[in-house]
């Protein structure tokens, strides 16, 4: 099978968003959460649409989330919950796939978005440089268990922000955004878990720098290969 690949992050200043970033909502259609999510996706699409029309593949998307100073940075406001369902909506509206999707969160008055052509870069490494293989549906507990059981030797990264990159190899029938949340929920051995937390409640609010990458391999079938690279923020290699 194809090996996981890592792509460069857009490093230029993106377009400032006019709508507050919205977390994923599983409420009924028309609910306030769904309205906020739709407005966020529409604002992002409007900001990147001109570049999407002319930028060649492979594409990278970057979303920088600005949070008020009174909001704890390392708890809740999980980055993957901003990206999903945003990215599937962008893919559907633009008819384009992203090879790499990035998100950050910080205390700031504004949020921004950028899109550009990207290129592969060398493996970023990290405190943890792991690779796992799964075969189960991402909607099942079996998927999470398969990942967790392959990283049980890990010890949680000490308290503080975490930079995480996940590079997926998937078959053409997999919608890779559907893998993000279940994969991150499985990383308790790396991210840590609160004493009273349920089994899959990893401390993913600690992730302040997230990079997601994908390669499609027709030979993958139902298998998913995931390269996991994690380290404290500020310790990652710059590319």
Image: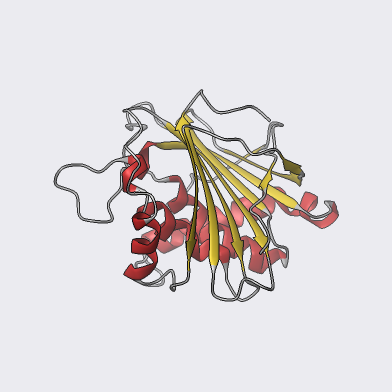
Q: Residue furthest top?
A: 234
Where is residue 43 shown, x and y percent of the image? 60, 52
Residue at figure coordinates x 54%, y 42% from the top left: 103
Task: Decide: is 233 above or below 23.
Answer: above
Task: Compare residues 130 and 170 and report the one nearer the observer.
Answer: 130
Q: Measured along the vertical axis of the image, is residue 2 above or below residue 210?
A: below
Residue at screen point 51% across, 23% down? 234
Left or right: 211 in relation to 206: right
Does residue 24 show up? no
Quarter of the image holding residue 139? bottom left
Residue 199 spot, x, y in % from top left: 23, 56
Q: Residue at x 38, y 43 (%)?
A: 77
Residue 61's spot in the image, x, y percent?
66, 48
Percent of width and height locating residue 39: 53, 56
Above or below: residue 164 compared with residue 134: above
User: Which sits in the foreground, 89 or 78?
Assistant: 78
- Left or right, 228 with reference to 123: left
Q: Residue furthest left?
A: 196
The answer to whether residue 174 is seen in the rendering is yes
Where does the C terminus fall, quadrant-wise?
top right
Q: Observer-nearest residue: 219 or 16?
A: 219
**Image check: 157 left or right of 59?**
left
Residue displayed at 29% across by 40% down: 192
């Amino acid at each position: 099978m194809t090996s996981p690949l890592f792509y460069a992050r857009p490093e230029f200043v993106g377009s400032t968003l006019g709508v507050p970033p919205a977390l994923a909502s599983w409420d009924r259609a028309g609910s306030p959460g769904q309205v906020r999510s739709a407005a966020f996706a529409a604002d992002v699409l409007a900001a990147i649409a001109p570049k999407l029309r002319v930028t060649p593949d492979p594409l990278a998307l970057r979303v920088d989330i600005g949070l008020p100073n009174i909001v704890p940075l390392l708890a809740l406001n999980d980055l993957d919950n901003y990206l999903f369902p945003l990215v599937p909506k962008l893919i559907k509206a633009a008819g384009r796939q992203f090879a790499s999707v990035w998100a950050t969160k910080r205390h700031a008055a504004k949020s921004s978005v950028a899109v550009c052509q990207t290129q592969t870069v060398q493996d970023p490494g990290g405190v943890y440089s792991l690779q796992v293989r799964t075969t189960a549906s991402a909607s099942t507990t079996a998927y999470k268990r398969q990942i967790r059981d392959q990283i049980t030797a890990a010890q949680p990264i000490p308290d503080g922000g975490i930079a995480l990159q996940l590079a997926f190899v998937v078959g053409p029938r997999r919608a890779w955004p559907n893998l993000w949340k279940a994969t991150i929920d499985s990383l308790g051995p790396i991210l840590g878990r609160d004493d009273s937390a349920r089994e899959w409640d990893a401390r993913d609010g600690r992730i302040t720098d997230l990079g997601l990458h994908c390669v499609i391999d027709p030979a993958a079938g139902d298998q998913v290969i995931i390269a996991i690279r994690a380290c404290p923020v500020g310790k990652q290699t710059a590319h």
